[in-house]
Amino acid sequence: MSKKIRIDKLLAHMGLGTRSEIKRAVKLGKVTFAGKVIKDSGLIVDSETTEVAFEGTPVVYQELVYFMLNKPQGVISATEDGRERTVIDLLEPQDRLREPFPVGRLDKDTVGLLLLTNDGQLAHELLSPRKHVAKTYEAIVQGKVGEDDKQSFAAGVALDDGYMTMPAVLEIREYEMRENEVFSSIALTIMEGKFHQVKRMFEAVDKTVVYLKRAAMGPLKLDESLPEGAYRELTNEEIELLRSHKRAAQ
């Protein structure tokens, strides 16, 4: 939906600089509208205009942004922190200016899919406990995960605080011996997002998660070609998948 917007706000929102930097760019003649250099950074334009250009490059306003990040270990899922490196610190400066935030949290040592967006409504739908959005994790577990664990998870397990989890789907992929100890490669799909839930579920069956990666959230799957620490914008198809999922859940 189109709306009226100041040209400096439009350019700043698209990551081309702060409002003060845009004002300087206007003074230097770097911004044009309808092919003409503008002198007023407060010029009001339609948000759907295709006639704004910055240093000769057309700029099309996009209010909402959606990034897929392959979160690496050692960073926290927050917008800012006084001591720790955050997922926002992994973004290019122009993308930080668009003020995305992480949808949900991954532990500091957990890797994989993290959605960053400024679409608060979609984030709420994906995180609402009432929506039961599926999340799939891949993990390496110390100990032999067996059919009894599958059945336990399918029935729901009691966590250390007494909370009983919803039924979860456990897939056992393979076993590996390391120094005479068995490690299990698994995938687990849960329908909620309690604090440290996957780790606590395996602790409930006397096993320890040593590596954890989120592979999917709702209909959104991690792009396996994306290196850890890298991110990209969602495709139109992926955005529509998320919006369709949201509509179906309403």
Image (cartoon, rainbow, N blue to C red):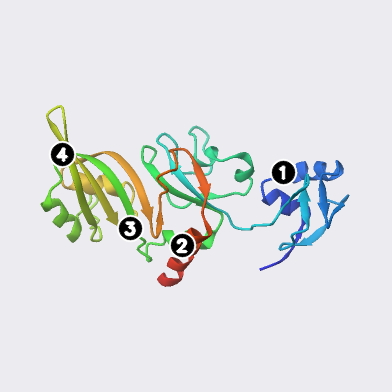
Q: Is residue 215 above or below residue 166?
A: above
Expressed as whole percent of the image width and height from the top left, the position of residue 167 reads 23, 61
**Residue denoted by label 3:** 192
What is the crowding at mark 4: few (fewer than 14 residues within 10 Å), some, or many (at least 20)?
some
Q: Which of marks 2 and 3 is in front?
A: 2
Q: Do the residues labelled 2 and 1 touch (CB within 8 Å)?
A: no
Of the 4 image quadrants, the one containing the C terminus is bottom left
Residue that carries the numbered disc 2 in the rendered image: 242
Q: What residue type is labelled 1?
A: Thr
> Residue 228, image x and y in percent?
43, 38
Tell me the amino acid under the disc marked 2: Leu
Q: Vertical placement of 164 versus 24: above or below?
A: below
Residue beneath label 4, please? 143
For the residue pair 74 and 83, the one nearer the viewer reads as 74
Q: Quadrant of residue 55?
A: top right
Q: Residue at 23% of width from left, 46% of height from top?
A: 186
SS at mark 2?
helix
Q: What residue type is labelled 4?
A: Gly
Disc ID at residue 18: 1
